[in-house]
Amino acid sequence: MEQFILFGDSITQQSASQAKGFGWTPALQDTYIRRLDVVNRGFSGYNTTQALSVLDRVLPTPEQGRIRLMTIFLGANDARLPNTPGFSQTVDLEQYKKNMTDIVNHPKLQAHKPQLILLTPPPIEERKALAHDQSNGINVMRRTASNTAKYAEAVRQIGQEFGIPVLDVWAAFMKEAGWKEGEPLPGSSEIEQNKALADMLHDGLHLNPEGYEIIYRELMKLITEKLPEHAPDNMPYVLPSWDDATAWK
């Protein structure tokens, strides 16, 4: 089987769980069953510096298994504000861009000639993120809606530079929240809480099933419209159906 690798941080790692309901990873595994092996390579807490450092260890060689599709979903941790309590995850914007570029161009990854899809980090809901941190004894805002938006824009720029499709998670969530360009950002603690956005993020950072359903829906739309050769309906089973008389002769 060729592989569809989901590479990212805790938002990818937790997408394998169905404890709260819909999970992005099992949904993709079902969609691509018998066509591609969908492999979750999410690493909770990782920023792009850490992700880049382990990339060589988590990818197969082309001889071990070919990567056909791969999502790169990083930035939520890089966008943490600097000099805030806890082990530092912050990666400044320019270094983040360099790290993402180095991931995209990594020789072991490029050896597969895969179809890459970049995902922007989702928005932040500041009130819920702060409340979650306060429950762990941290009374300082560590993430803001405006700063995360800058990292989402960086992913768009990288996608444009390298001609890689971008699943704009940030924009998809903002659309669901009813936001329009020029308005204050939903998720900011300076305005009234946006219920739609709050419902997508259970702790202000990580996704509820509603959020994962949006990602799954938008990803399949992107693949169907822009990468149709990788759409499941256009990919035959790797092994024949049980009742394929010609194949079993």
Image (cartoon, grey):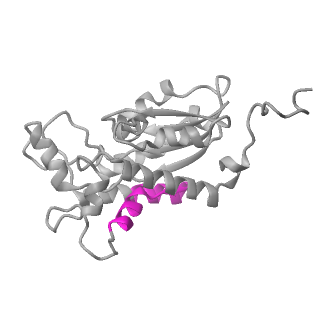
Position of residue 244 measured from the top left corner of the image (x, y, whole percent): 85, 34
The answer to whether 191 is drawn above or below residue 4 in the figure is below
Nearer to us in this view, 48 or 23? 23
**Residue 103 shows in the view:** yes
Magenta region: which residues? Answer: 153-177
Residue 181: quarter of image: bottom left
Is 163 contained in the magenta span? yes
Residue 146: quarter of image: bottom left
Question: For this view, does 38 lie left or right of residue 77?
Answer: right
Q: Count the marks: how many?
A: 0
Q: Residue at x 34, y 41 (%)?
A: 20
The answer to whether 246 is drawn above or below residue 126 in the figure is above
Residue 152: quarter of image: bottom left
Is 166 contained in the magenta span? yes
The answer to whether 163 is drawn above or below residue 1 in the figure is below
Position of residue 135 measured from the top left corner of the image (x, y, whole percent): 10, 39
Position of residue 75 measured from the top left corner of the image (x, y, whole percent): 35, 47
Nearer to us in this view, 21 or 89? 21
The answer to whether 227 is drawn above or below residue 54 in the figure is below
Position of residue 90 measured from the top left corner of the image (x, y, whole percent): 25, 43
Quarter of the figure with the C terminus? top right
**Residue 164 shows in the view:** no
Q: Residue at x 72, y 49 (%)?
A: 234
Question: For this view, does 246 lie left or right of residue 57?
Answer: right
Q: Residue at x 15, y 55 (%)?
A: 127
Instruction: From the image, give the main secondary structure of the stretch colored magenta.
Output: helix
Quarter of the figure with the N terminus? top right
